[in-house]
Amino acid sequence: MHRESTSSPRSTQRWKSRLLAIASALLLGLGAIPLTATASAAAAPCSPAWESSLAYTAGADVSHGGKNYEAAWWSQGLTPTGQLPWKNLGACSPAPVIPAGCFTPWTAYVQYNANTKVTHGQRNYQAALYSEAVVPGTSGAHWQDIGACGGGGGNPNPQPSAVMFDDFSYSSRNDPQLTNDRWVLRTGGGGPGLDGVSWSPNNISFQDRDGQRVLKLDVTSSGQAANTVQAQITTADRKFREGTYGARVKFSDAPMYGPDGDHVVQAFFSITPLRYDYDPEYGELDFEYLPNGGWAAPQAFYVTSWETYRPEPWDALKDYDMMTRSYAGWHDLVVTLDATSAVYYIDGVEVGRHHAPNLPKSDQTIDFNHWLINDGVLPTSQARGYEQLVDWVYFAEGETLSPSQVQSQVNTLRSTGVAFRDNVPD
């Protein structure tokens, strides 16, 4: 690798009819029962054509032989004939025509295997893994955007003109290329976290994990500030503002060793530092996971957009959303920022949408850190350690990209051997 510096609703009556037919078959001990809809004056448009290779779940609509059918239960390879599990909905017209350069339209109630190609919203997608009820364009983990429907060749997903990307393929924290690529490992003290805590490059490493070279940030503690060490890595340059930010991060609920229970914060964020109370230049976009809770909340994941704040007494101007469940494991994080809003996604699902004035207004750095909340340290002197992993980070200046587009951009960079790129102007 090289481095560069530059579901549609169903009517109640349809469901009642289907259930009555199935119940009759079971009670009377009959075999296959012809199920035919009442004829209508005008034929309905044809649903997507039935395909023998696809698995259909209850509620799926297909067309076959000039007729529409609806699935009563799961099936695969059973030709629609008007017998269970297919209900004949009547003649349809015209037969579905797929334009050149497009694929069968994506529909709900269909189970798609990896590599299946579909069209949705005038875009073509290829399943990256098994998918059901995941709308293309909402999850890069499930669907890869492969270009416009009928686009006619060329690069279906060209790279934005100004991009920062790093897949963290460094040999170690002492790799000179890490500095050349404009990363800084935090040292010294200061917040956030315990009063008197330290930040050390020794708590940052690069390892082969889960089939990839990854960045690893550790928090280690024995219960006191003097023996607590936190980790943070930041871009040396403050030059990131409006655009699309993304990262693939592995969060952990349990410590690597020792007792569990500290209020740990595992974070990916962009920031302009606060110089004084209510600094108008300050701003921040945060993904923060608290596996053991904190800030008067249970286990939680916060996405937060900051206008500014005052540390003492505490007062903040911000918008946030909170999800209260485990996020242990790998997750794709994306946030888009423009003059009016910041939109947050986790694994392709929108989890927060915040608006002006609670948005950053100046250039920021991009950061990852791992730390302990000041009043959330487990009252024991037994040593413990927590880890956070990062696979890649991505930024596209001035572009609003969907999560699937971000994943496609990252896949393209990696497939062409790019380990690092930064042509975002200072």
Image (cartoon, helix red, strand yellow):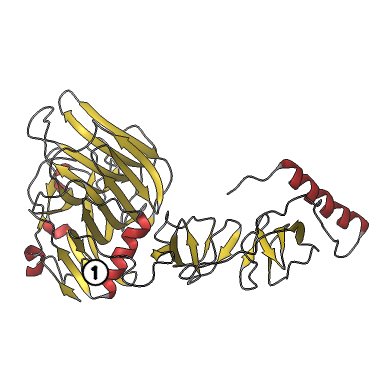
The number of discs equals 1
Percent position (x, y) of residue 200? 12, 54
Q: Nearer the viewer, residue 47 or 163?
A: 47
User: Is residue 80 rendered to the left or right of residue 173?
Assistant: right
Left or right: where 109 falls relative to 344: right
199 on left or right of 59: left
Q: Is residue 294 visible?
A: no
Give how far across and how far down residue 28 sits, in percent.
Answer: 93, 57
Percent position (x, y) of residue 21? 84, 53
Residue indicated by mark 1: 207
Q: Residue at point 50% right, 65% down?
A: 118
The residue depicted at 40 percent of the width and 53 percent of the height is 348
Residue 335 percent location from the top left of the image? 29, 48
Pick out the residue farthest to the right: 28
Look at 42% across and 56% down and name the residue there. 137
Identity, as a three-letter code, of the amino acid under mark 1: Gln
Rendered position, 340 above or below 205: above
> Looking at the image, can residue 323 be seen?
yes
Compared with 21, 51 (above or below) is below
**Viewed as shown, does residue 196 lie left or right of 389?**
left
Estimate how packed mark 1 is, as few (under 14), some (14 to 19) or many (20 or more) residues with alpha carbons within 10 Å. Answer: some
Secondary structure of the residue carrying tag 1 is strand
Q: Nearer the viewer, residue 8 or 297?
A: 8
> What residue lies at 81% left-to-right and 51% top-to-bottom?
38
Given residues 120 and 282, the one toward you in this image is 120
Which quadrant would the N terminus be assigned to in this image?
Answer: bottom left
